[in-house]
């Protein structure tokens, strides 16, 4: 098993990618820009977590986890737009936002831990 596969945030990110894909498949024609943005942002969470886990220095890990966190908040923003445009049901929107909030919380903890480790190394 690779390092990133051991991370709960990676597993939750994979779950979100699958849920986002299900939602994207149901978007009406003419909303491809939202589908593309959500697909890229959701996948970026997972890819940046994986890349960060593969780095050795705390600074590098923190940088990739920070990018992943940004992509998670970007995913949340796309969902908010879809909700405002009545393209997603409130229950599905809320469930996906709950996943993203958890991902952001987990990434924030990882970022802080690695920033502290970098500071401790001096």
Image: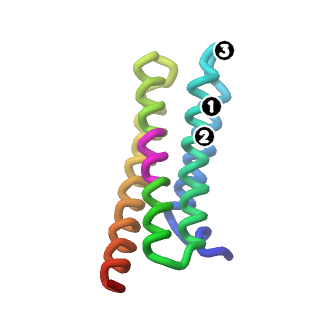
CA–CA distance in space, label 3 to label 1: 13 Å
Disc assigned to residue 36 = 1
Disc 3 marks which residue? 29
Residue 26 vs 53, above or below: the answer is above
Q: Main secondary structure of the magenta part?
A: helix
> Does 70 appear in magenta?
yes
Q: Secondary structure at mark 3?
A: loop
How crowded is the residue under tag 1: few (<14 C-alpha within 10 Å), some, or many (20+)? few
How crowded is the residue under tag 3: few (<14 C-alpha within 10 Å), some, or many (20+)? few
Q: Locate the C terminus and report the quarter of the image it occupies.
A: bottom left
How far across and how far down the image is residue 97, in percent? 42, 40
> Which stretch did the figure color magenta?
68-74
CA–CA distance in space, label 2 to label 1: 6 Å
Disc 2 marks which residue? 40
Which one is earlier in the sequence, the residue at label 2 or at label 3? 3
Q: Secondary structure at mark 1?
A: helix
């Amino acid at each position: 098993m690779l390092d990133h596969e051991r991370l709960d945030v990676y597993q939750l990110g994979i779950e979100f990618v699958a849920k986002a894909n299900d939602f994207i498949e149901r978007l009406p024609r003419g909303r491809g820009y939202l589908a593309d943005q959500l697909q890229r942002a959701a996948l970026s969470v997972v890819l940046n977590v994986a890349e960060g886990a593969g780095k050795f220095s705390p600074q590098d890990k923190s940088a990739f986890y920070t990018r992943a966190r940004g992509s998670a908040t970007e995913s949340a923003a796309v969902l908010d737009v879809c909700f405002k445009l009545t393209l997603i049901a409130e229950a599905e929107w809320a469930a996906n936002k709950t996943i993203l909030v958890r991902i952001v919380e987990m990434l924030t903890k990882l970022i802080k831990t690695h920033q502290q480790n970098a500071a401790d190394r001096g």
